[in-house]
Image (spheres, rainbow, N blue to C red):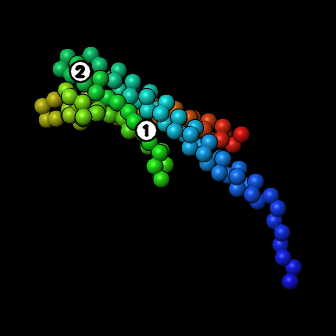
Amino acid sequence: MDGVTVTGINAVVEDLEAFAVHLTVNARKAVQVTSLKIKRDAQSRVSGHPRWAKYPRTITYDTKVTPDGIEGEIGPDKSLKGQAPYGAIIEYGTGVTAPIPHLGPALDANAEDLIRGIEIAISQAIR
């Protein structure tokens, strides 16, 4: 019985490993850039409200690579003192206070930017 000889497989494996590394780095950059845009957008949407004057400064973002992918988290940092714990009340309102939607609309407004960023990350990783 004749065997099969495969040549060049090591180069393919190395290329795939390099692609994964480059894609992770570039995709994280895309998530970071979009997260920053969402943070700034949300801050601008809630800025100037007399009752919540200090709240916009509590909105932060963080990104991390996990085994499942890349995560971006944007919102009030409740470890900061001040008005951060009121984020949900501000966003959704209560029975006696009107909502000031800022995080949801900022996310919606920047979703296409994230898609473009991931597309760029893929194309750069292929090179």
Left/right of residue 97 with respect to residue 116 in the rendered view: left
Q: Amino acid at mark 2?
A: Lys
Q: Amino acid at mark 1?
A: Thr
Q: Secondary structure at mark 1?
A: strand
Question: Do tag 2 and tag 1 residues touch (Cβ < 8 Å)?
Answer: no
Q: Report x, y in % for residue 87.
A: 24, 33
Q: Most extreme residue toward the bottom, as rendered?
A: 1
Q: Residue beneath label 1, please? A: 63
Q: Could you say which is closer to the camera, residue 94 or residue 113?
A: 113
Q: Report x, y in % for residue 24.
A: 56, 43
Q: Could you say which is closer to the camera, residue 78 or residue 117?
A: 78
* Crowd class of label 1 (few under 14; some 14 to 19; many from 20; radius 10 Å): some
Quarter where residue 62 is shown: top left
Of the numbered discs 2 and 1, the one sitting upstream in the chain is: 2
Q: Residue beneath label 2, please? A: 54
Quadrant for the N terminus in the image:
bottom right
